[in-house]
Amino acid sequence: MRLRTGFLTLLFCALSLGSLSVFAADVWPEKVKVGGEYRLRLESEINYDFDSSVPASDTYLLSRLRVYLDLNPSPHLQLFGMFQDSETIDQGNAVFKTPDQRRLYQAFFVVKSKPGALETRIKGGRQELKYGDERLIGALNWSNLGRSFDGVVLHFETKAFWLDLFGTRIKPQGKEVQFAGGYAQLKKFPTGILEPYVLFLHGNQSGVDNGPLDLVTVGTRVKGKFKKHFDYGFEGAYQSGKSNGNLVSAFALHSEIGVNIPKSFKPRFELEYNFASGDSSPGVGTVTTFNNLFPTNHSKYGYMDLFSWKNLHDLKLGFSAKPVSFFQASVDYHLFFLPQPADGVFAANGRQLRPGIPGASPYAGQEIDFLFTFKPIKHFDALVGYSMFFPGSFFSDTGPSDRAQFFYTQFVAKY
Protein backbone atom coordinates (compact mmCIF):
# COMPACT_ATOMS: atom_id res chain seq x y z
CA MET A 1 0.00 0.00 0.00
CA ARG A 2 2.77 2.47 0.94
CA LEU A 3 4.76 1.52 -2.17
CA ARG A 4 1.77 2.14 -4.45
CA THR A 5 0.96 5.47 -2.76
CA GLY A 6 4.60 6.53 -3.05
CA PHE A 7 4.63 5.64 -6.75
CA LEU A 8 1.45 7.65 -7.36
CA THR A 9 2.98 10.61 -5.55
CA LEU A 10 6.19 10.47 -7.61
CA LEU A 11 4.21 10.07 -10.83
CA PHE A 12 2.02 13.05 -10.05
CA CYS A 13 5.03 15.20 -9.12
CA ALA A 14 6.79 14.24 -12.34
CA LEU A 15 3.76 15.11 -14.43
CA SER A 16 3.34 18.35 -12.52
CA LEU A 17 6.94 19.44 -13.03
CA GLY A 18 6.81 18.51 -16.69
CA SER A 19 3.65 20.53 -17.19
CA LEU A 20 4.95 23.50 -15.20
CA SER A 21 8.06 23.70 -17.37
CA VAL A 22 5.99 24.58 -20.45
CA PHE A 23 3.90 27.28 -18.79
CA ALA A 24 4.77 30.87 -19.53
CA ALA A 25 4.50 33.36 -16.68
CA ASP A 26 1.59 35.20 -18.27
CA VAL A 27 -0.64 32.07 -18.36
CA TRP A 28 0.24 30.74 -14.91
CA PRO A 29 -3.07 31.79 -13.25
CA GLU A 30 -5.12 30.07 -15.97
CA LYS A 31 -3.07 26.87 -16.06
CA VAL A 32 -2.23 26.25 -12.41
CA LYS A 33 -4.40 26.35 -9.31
CA VAL A 34 -3.09 25.68 -5.81
CA GLY A 35 -5.40 25.55 -2.82
CA GLY A 36 -6.92 23.50 -0.08
CA GLU A 37 -8.67 23.69 3.24
CA TYR A 38 -8.04 23.27 6.94
CA ARG A 39 -10.87 21.90 9.07
CA LEU A 40 -11.06 21.67 12.86
CA ARG A 41 -13.98 20.04 14.66
CA LEU A 42 -14.71 19.41 18.33
CA GLU A 43 -17.13 16.56 19.06
CA SER A 44 -18.61 15.41 22.35
CA GLU A 45 -20.61 12.18 22.46
CA ILE A 46 -22.54 11.78 25.70
CA ASN A 47 -24.00 8.44 26.82
CA TYR A 48 -23.70 6.77 23.42
CA ASP A 49 -23.93 3.42 25.22
CA PHE A 50 -27.42 4.48 26.41
CA ASP A 51 -26.54 3.49 29.99
CA SER A 52 -26.60 6.41 32.45
CA SER A 53 -25.71 4.10 35.37
CA VAL A 54 -22.17 4.05 33.95
CA PRO A 55 -21.57 7.67 32.86
CA ALA A 56 -19.82 7.68 29.50
CA SER A 57 -18.68 10.58 27.37
CA ASP A 58 -16.11 10.88 24.62
CA THR A 59 -14.78 14.31 23.67
CA TYR A 60 -12.19 14.65 20.94
CA LEU A 61 -10.74 17.07 18.42
CA LEU A 62 -10.62 16.26 14.71
CA SER A 63 -8.10 18.03 12.50
CA ARG A 64 -7.91 17.70 8.71
CA LEU A 65 -5.65 19.46 6.22
CA ARG A 66 -6.10 19.12 2.47
CA VAL A 67 -3.77 20.67 -0.11
CA TYR A 68 -4.31 20.35 -3.86
CA LEU A 69 -2.56 21.14 -7.13
CA ASP A 70 -4.71 21.50 -10.24
CA LEU A 71 -2.92 21.67 -13.60
CA ASN A 72 -4.66 22.42 -16.91
CA PRO A 73 -1.95 22.44 -19.59
CA SER A 74 -4.56 22.42 -22.39
CA PRO A 75 -8.36 22.67 -22.75
CA HIS A 76 -8.42 18.90 -23.16
CA LEU A 77 -6.19 17.79 -20.27
CA GLN A 78 -6.35 18.17 -16.50
CA LEU A 79 -3.98 16.79 -13.84
CA PHE A 80 -5.11 16.95 -10.23
CA GLY A 81 -3.61 15.83 -6.94
CA MET A 82 -4.68 16.29 -3.32
CA PHE A 83 -2.72 15.42 -0.20
CA GLN A 84 -4.56 14.90 3.09
CA ASP A 85 -3.40 14.84 6.69
CA SER A 86 -5.93 13.76 9.36
CA GLU A 87 -5.49 13.57 13.11
CA THR A 88 -7.71 12.80 16.08
CA ILE A 89 -6.88 14.03 19.57
CA ASP A 90 -8.81 12.61 22.51
CA GLN A 91 -9.33 13.89 26.05
CA GLY A 92 -5.89 12.60 27.09
CA ASN A 93 -4.21 14.52 24.25
CA ALA A 94 -3.26 11.26 22.55
CA VAL A 95 -2.97 11.55 18.79
CA PHE A 96 -4.47 8.55 17.01
CA LYS A 97 -2.61 7.62 13.83
CA THR A 98 -4.17 5.39 11.19
CA PRO A 99 -2.73 3.99 7.94
CA ASP A 100 -4.75 6.64 6.11
CA GLN A 101 -3.73 9.55 8.32
CA ARG A 102 -1.31 10.99 5.75
CA ARG A 103 -2.03 9.98 2.19
CA LEU A 104 -2.52 11.02 -1.39
CA TYR A 105 -6.28 11.43 -1.15
CA GLN A 106 -6.83 12.17 -4.85
CA ALA A 107 -4.55 11.85 -7.89
CA PHE A 108 -6.22 11.71 -11.29
CA PHE A 109 -6.05 12.83 -14.91
CA VAL A 110 -8.95 13.99 -17.08
CA VAL A 111 -8.90 13.87 -20.89
CA LYS A 112 -11.74 15.82 -22.53
CA SER A 113 -13.08 15.84 -26.07
CA LYS A 114 -13.69 18.95 -28.10
CA PRO A 115 -17.05 20.69 -27.48
CA GLY A 116 -19.81 19.27 -29.67
CA ALA A 117 -23.17 17.56 -29.74
CA LEU A 118 -21.68 14.70 -27.74
CA GLU A 119 -18.96 15.54 -25.24
CA THR A 120 -16.86 12.79 -23.74
CA ARG A 121 -14.44 12.67 -20.84
CA ILE A 122 -12.26 10.01 -19.26
CA LYS A 123 -11.13 10.39 -15.68
CA GLY A 124 -8.62 7.94 -14.27
CA GLY A 125 -6.85 7.52 -10.95
CA ARG A 126 -7.77 8.08 -7.32
CA GLN A 127 -10.92 10.17 -7.09
CA GLU A 128 -14.11 10.88 -5.19
CA LEU A 129 -17.44 9.56 -6.47
CA LYS A 130 -20.59 11.53 -5.68
CA TYR A 131 -23.99 10.84 -7.22
CA GLY A 132 -27.48 12.11 -6.41
CA ASP A 133 -28.03 12.84 -2.74
CA GLU A 134 -25.10 10.51 -1.93
CA ARG A 135 -27.46 7.98 -0.34
CA LEU A 136 -25.60 5.12 -2.07
CA ILE A 137 -22.41 6.70 -3.46
CA GLY A 138 -20.75 9.59 -1.67
CA ALA A 139 -17.46 11.18 -0.64
CA LEU A 140 -18.25 10.95 3.11
CA ASN A 141 -16.92 14.46 3.67
CA TRP A 142 -18.11 14.61 7.31
CA SER A 143 -15.60 11.86 8.12
CA ASN A 144 -12.10 13.00 8.99
CA LEU A 145 -10.73 10.60 6.36
CA GLY A 146 -13.29 10.99 3.58
CA ARG A 147 -13.65 8.39 0.85
CA SER A 148 -11.93 8.04 -2.52
CA PHE A 149 -11.88 5.25 -5.10
CA ASP A 150 -9.16 3.97 -7.44
CA GLY A 151 -10.47 3.52 -10.97
CA VAL A 152 -11.77 4.99 -14.21
CA VAL A 153 -14.93 6.98 -15.05
CA LEU A 154 -16.16 7.44 -18.63
CA HIS A 155 -18.49 10.43 -19.03
CA PHE A 156 -20.79 11.09 -22.01
CA GLU A 157 -22.98 14.20 -22.21
CA THR A 158 -25.45 15.90 -24.54
CA LYS A 159 -28.00 18.65 -23.99
CA ALA A 160 -30.57 16.02 -23.03
CA PHE A 161 -28.63 13.64 -20.77
CA TRP A 162 -25.32 12.55 -19.29
CA LEU A 163 -24.05 9.05 -18.53
CA ASP A 164 -21.19 7.84 -16.34
CA LEU A 165 -19.72 4.35 -16.65
CA PHE A 166 -17.22 3.55 -13.91
CA GLY A 167 -15.05 0.73 -12.66
CA THR A 168 -13.27 1.14 -9.33
CA ARG A 169 -11.88 -0.57 -6.29
CA ILE A 170 -11.81 0.45 -2.65
CA LYS A 171 -10.72 -1.11 0.64
CA PRO A 172 -13.42 -0.59 3.29
CA GLN A 173 -12.28 -2.03 6.64
CA GLY A 174 -9.07 -3.20 4.97
CA LYS A 175 -10.47 -5.69 2.41
CA GLU A 176 -10.57 -4.88 -1.28
CA VAL A 177 -13.94 -4.51 -3.00
CA GLN A 178 -14.66 -4.01 -6.70
CA PHE A 179 -17.36 -1.45 -7.35
CA ALA A 180 -18.66 -0.63 -10.84
CA GLY A 181 -21.76 0.61 -12.56
CA GLY A 182 -23.61 3.10 -14.69
CA TYR A 183 -25.31 6.28 -13.52
CA ALA A 184 -27.26 8.58 -15.85
CA GLN A 185 -29.26 11.79 -15.69
CA LEU A 186 -32.11 12.79 -18.01
CA LYS A 187 -32.09 16.58 -17.84
CA LYS A 188 -35.46 17.27 -19.45
CA PHE A 189 -37.66 15.14 -17.23
CA PRO A 190 -40.93 17.05 -16.50
CA THR A 191 -40.49 19.43 -13.51
CA GLY A 192 -36.94 18.21 -12.83
CA ILE A 193 -34.43 15.44 -13.46
CA LEU A 194 -34.53 11.65 -13.63
CA GLU A 195 -31.46 9.60 -12.67
CA PRO A 196 -31.52 5.83 -13.33
CA TYR A 197 -28.59 3.67 -12.23
CA VAL A 198 -27.28 0.12 -11.97
CA LEU A 199 -24.45 -0.72 -9.56
CA PHE A 200 -22.31 -3.84 -9.11
CA LEU A 201 -20.45 -4.77 -5.93
CA HIS A 202 -18.09 -7.72 -5.63
CA GLY A 203 -15.90 -8.63 -2.67
CA ASN A 204 -16.30 -8.64 1.08
CA GLN A 205 -17.24 -5.61 3.15
CA SER A 206 -15.63 -6.81 6.36
CA GLY A 207 -17.54 -5.68 9.42
CA VAL A 208 -20.62 -4.79 7.37
CA ASP A 209 -21.58 -7.99 5.56
CA ASN A 210 -19.69 -11.16 6.37
CA GLY A 211 -18.48 -13.56 3.70
CA PRO A 212 -18.34 -13.27 -0.13
CA LEU A 213 -20.67 -10.69 -1.59
CA ASP A 214 -21.95 -10.24 -5.14
CA LEU A 215 -24.59 -7.56 -5.30
CA VAL A 216 -26.54 -5.79 -8.06
CA THR A 217 -28.43 -2.60 -7.18
CA VAL A 218 -30.93 -1.14 -9.66
CA GLY A 219 -32.69 2.12 -8.92
CA THR A 220 -33.73 5.59 -9.91
CA ARG A 221 -33.87 9.06 -8.42
CA VAL A 222 -36.25 11.89 -9.31
CA LYS A 223 -35.93 15.47 -8.14
CA GLY A 224 -37.69 18.68 -9.17
CA LYS A 225 -39.99 21.60 -8.42
CA PHE A 226 -43.68 22.31 -8.89
CA LYS A 227 -46.11 25.17 -8.19
CA LYS A 228 -43.25 27.66 -7.82
CA HIS A 229 -42.50 27.25 -4.10
CA PHE A 230 -42.69 23.45 -3.76
CA ASP A 231 -40.03 20.85 -4.47
CA TYR A 232 -39.94 17.09 -4.24
CA GLY A 233 -37.58 14.12 -4.33
CA PHE A 234 -37.89 10.36 -4.66
CA GLU A 235 -35.41 7.51 -4.84
CA GLY A 236 -36.04 3.79 -4.97
CA ALA A 237 -33.56 0.91 -5.22
CA TYR A 238 -33.76 -2.88 -5.40
CA GLN A 239 -30.91 -5.29 -4.67
CA SER A 240 -30.31 -8.88 -5.70
CA GLY A 241 -27.36 -11.25 -5.81
CA LYS A 242 -25.63 -13.42 -3.22
CA SER A 243 -24.23 -12.78 0.25
CA ASN A 244 -22.14 -15.54 1.82
CA GLY A 245 -23.88 -18.08 -0.41
CA ASN A 246 -27.42 -16.87 0.34
CA LEU A 247 -29.69 -15.14 -2.15
CA VAL A 248 -30.28 -11.40 -1.68
CA SER A 249 -33.60 -9.62 -2.17
CA ALA A 250 -33.79 -6.18 -0.55
CA PHE A 251 -35.09 -2.71 -1.33
CA ALA A 252 -35.15 0.87 -0.08
CA LEU A 253 -36.93 4.12 -0.86
CA HIS A 254 -36.73 7.80 -0.03
CA SER A 255 -39.38 10.47 -0.52
CA GLU A 256 -39.48 14.14 0.40
CA ILE A 257 -41.48 17.27 -0.16
CA GLY A 258 -40.42 20.79 0.72
CA VAL A 259 -41.96 24.24 0.65
CA ASN A 260 -40.07 27.53 0.54
CA ILE A 261 -42.08 30.39 2.02
CA PRO A 262 -41.52 33.68 0.13
CA LYS A 263 -40.42 35.70 3.16
CA SER A 264 -37.26 37.73 3.76
CA PHE A 265 -35.85 35.22 6.28
CA LYS A 266 -36.33 32.34 3.79
CA PRO A 267 -38.26 29.83 5.91
CA ARG A 268 -38.39 26.28 4.59
CA PHE A 269 -40.42 23.27 5.77
CA GLU A 270 -39.61 19.66 4.86
CA LEU A 271 -41.41 16.34 5.23
CA GLU A 272 -39.40 13.22 4.50
CA TYR A 273 -39.80 9.46 4.75
CA ASN A 274 -37.02 6.89 4.41
CA PHE A 275 -37.39 3.12 4.30
CA ALA A 276 -34.93 0.24 3.98
CA SER A 277 -35.78 -3.43 4.34
CA GLY A 278 -34.44 -5.60 7.14
CA ASP A 279 -34.21 -9.33 7.82
CA SER A 280 -36.67 -11.21 10.03
CA SER A 281 -34.19 -14.11 10.45
CA PRO A 282 -30.63 -12.74 10.14
CA GLY A 283 -28.17 -15.32 8.85
CA VAL A 284 -30.89 -17.75 7.74
CA GLY A 285 -32.16 -18.10 4.16
CA THR A 286 -32.61 -15.19 1.77
CA VAL A 287 -30.90 -11.98 2.87
CA THR A 288 -33.44 -9.13 2.93
CA THR A 289 -31.36 -6.47 4.70
CA PHE A 290 -30.65 -3.58 2.33
CA ASN A 291 -26.96 -2.81 1.76
CA ASN A 292 -26.25 0.93 2.03
CA LEU A 293 -23.13 0.60 -0.23
CA PHE A 294 -20.84 3.69 0.02
CA PRO A 295 -23.05 6.57 1.18
CA THR A 296 -22.67 9.88 2.93
CA ASN A 297 -25.17 9.07 5.68
CA HIS A 298 -24.42 11.96 7.99
CA SER A 299 -27.44 14.29 8.25
CA LYS A 300 -29.65 11.93 6.23
CA TYR A 301 -31.01 9.91 9.17
CA GLY A 302 -30.11 12.16 12.09
CA TYR A 303 -26.90 14.05 12.87
CA MET A 304 -25.98 11.62 15.65
CA ASP A 305 -25.21 8.93 13.02
CA LEU A 306 -27.10 6.23 14.94
CA PHE A 307 -29.03 5.00 11.88
CA SER A 308 -28.38 4.21 8.23
CA TRP A 309 -30.47 3.28 5.16
CA LYS A 310 -30.71 -0.25 6.50
CA ASN A 311 -33.63 -1.91 8.35
CA LEU A 312 -35.27 1.45 8.85
CA HIS A 313 -38.47 3.47 8.91
CA ASP A 314 -37.58 7.16 9.37
CA LEU A 315 -40.12 9.98 9.37
CA LYS A 316 -38.46 13.40 9.35
CA LEU A 317 -39.89 16.89 9.87
CA GLY A 318 -37.54 19.78 9.21
CA PHE A 319 -37.51 23.56 9.40
CA SER A 320 -34.81 26.05 8.44
CA ALA A 321 -34.50 29.80 8.13
CA LYS A 322 -31.87 32.22 6.86
CA PRO A 323 -32.51 35.63 8.46
CA VAL A 324 -29.27 37.10 7.06
CA SER A 325 -27.02 36.04 4.19
CA PHE A 326 -24.24 34.63 6.40
CA PHE A 327 -26.33 32.73 8.98
CA GLN A 328 -28.75 29.80 8.80
CA ALA A 329 -30.56 27.90 11.55
CA SER A 330 -32.35 24.58 11.25
CA VAL A 331 -34.12 22.03 13.41
CA ASP A 332 -34.97 18.45 12.39
CA TYR A 333 -37.15 15.87 14.13
CA HIS A 334 -36.81 12.14 13.38
CA LEU A 335 -39.13 9.31 14.41
CA PHE A 336 -37.52 5.86 13.98
CA PHE A 337 -39.05 2.40 13.67
CA LEU A 338 -37.50 -0.92 12.61
CA PRO A 339 -39.20 -3.04 9.90
CA GLN A 340 -37.60 -6.14 11.45
CA PRO A 341 -36.68 -5.71 15.16
CA ALA A 342 -34.78 -9.01 15.08
CA ASP A 343 -32.29 -7.42 12.66
CA GLY A 344 -31.32 -4.64 15.08
CA VAL A 345 -30.15 -1.07 14.55
CA PHE A 346 -27.40 -0.23 12.06
CA ALA A 347 -25.34 2.93 12.56
CA ALA A 348 -24.34 5.38 9.83
CA ASN A 349 -21.12 3.42 9.16
CA GLY A 350 -23.20 0.31 8.35
CA ARG A 351 -22.19 -1.61 11.46
CA GLN A 352 -24.73 -2.95 13.92
CA LEU A 353 -25.24 -0.52 16.79
CA ARG A 354 -27.65 -2.69 18.79
CA PRO A 355 -28.43 -6.37 17.99
CA GLY A 356 -32.09 -7.24 17.77
CA ILE A 357 -34.09 -10.07 19.29
CA PRO A 358 -37.30 -11.74 18.09
CA GLY A 359 -40.35 -10.14 19.67
CA ALA A 360 -38.68 -6.80 20.45
CA SER A 361 -40.66 -3.61 19.88
CA PRO A 362 -40.21 -1.98 16.46
CA TYR A 363 -40.21 1.51 18.02
CA ALA A 364 -36.54 2.62 17.99
CA GLY A 365 -36.78 6.21 19.24
CA GLN A 366 -36.75 9.90 18.41
CA GLU A 367 -34.02 12.39 17.61
CA ILE A 368 -34.02 16.17 17.49
CA ASP A 369 -31.18 18.07 15.80
CA PHE A 370 -30.31 21.77 16.08
CA LEU A 371 -27.79 23.20 13.62
CA PHE A 372 -26.47 26.74 13.19
CA THR A 373 -24.15 27.58 10.28
CA PHE A 374 -22.11 30.73 9.71
CA LYS A 375 -20.28 32.03 6.64
CA PRO A 376 -19.14 35.59 7.46
CA ILE A 377 -16.49 35.76 4.72
CA LYS A 378 -15.80 33.95 1.45
CA HIS A 379 -13.04 31.60 2.62
CA PHE A 380 -14.30 30.76 6.10
CA ASP A 381 -17.35 28.98 7.52
CA ALA A 382 -18.34 27.55 10.86
CA LEU A 383 -21.14 25.56 12.43
CA VAL A 384 -22.47 24.61 15.87
CA GLY A 385 -24.81 21.70 16.47
CA TYR A 386 -26.58 19.94 19.29
CA SER A 387 -28.62 16.72 19.10
CA MET A 388 -30.58 14.52 21.51
CA PHE A 389 -31.73 10.93 21.03
CA PHE A 390 -34.55 9.44 23.08
CA PRO A 391 -34.42 5.63 22.78
CA GLY A 392 -37.68 3.82 22.15
CA SER A 393 -38.98 0.57 23.57
CA PHE A 394 -36.77 -1.45 21.18
CA PHE A 395 -33.76 -0.32 23.21
CA SER A 396 -35.41 -1.07 26.56
CA ASP A 397 -36.31 -4.53 25.22
CA THR A 398 -32.71 -5.24 24.21
CA GLY A 399 -30.57 -3.44 26.82
CA PRO A 400 -29.85 0.02 28.27
CA SER A 401 -32.16 2.74 26.95
CA ASP A 402 -31.17 6.09 28.43
CA ARG A 403 -31.01 9.38 26.52
CA ALA A 404 -27.89 10.20 24.47
CA GLN A 405 -26.58 13.61 23.39
CA PHE A 406 -24.19 14.99 20.80
CA PHE A 407 -22.50 18.40 20.69
CA TYR A 408 -20.10 19.63 18.00
CA THR A 409 -18.61 22.76 16.55
CA GLN A 410 -16.57 23.06 13.36
CA PHE A 411 -14.40 25.67 11.64
CA VAL A 412 -13.25 25.51 8.02
CA ALA A 413 -10.78 27.80 6.29
CA LYS A 414 -10.33 27.49 2.52
CA TYR A 415 -7.56 28.99 0.44
Image (spheres, grey):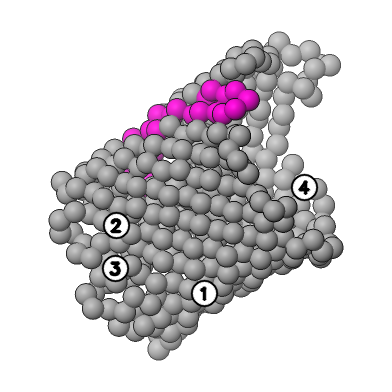
- Which dot, 4 or 1, sits closer to the camera? 1
| Image location of residue 253, percent across then percent down | 43, 55
Q: Secondary structure at mark 4?
A: loop
First in sequence, mark 3 or 1: give its number. Answer: 3
| Mark 3–mark 4 CB contact (< 8 Å) | no
Left or right, 300 with respect to 99, comes to right
Q: Amino acid at mark 4?
A: His
Above or below, comparing residue 132 to residue 95 in the picture: above
Q: Secondary structure at mark 3?
A: loop
Above or below, comparing residue 165 to residue 269 in the picture: above
Q: Write down the residue under mark 4.
A: 379
The quadrant of the rendering that contains the N terminus is top left
Q: Write down the residue under mark 1.
A: 367
Q: Write down the residue under mark 2.
A: 289
First in sequence, mark 3 or 2: give its number. Answer: 2
Outermost residue to the bottom: 53
Q: Is residue 217 magenta?
A: no
Q: Amino acid at mark 2?
A: Thr
Mark-to-mark CA distance, 1 and 2: 23 Å
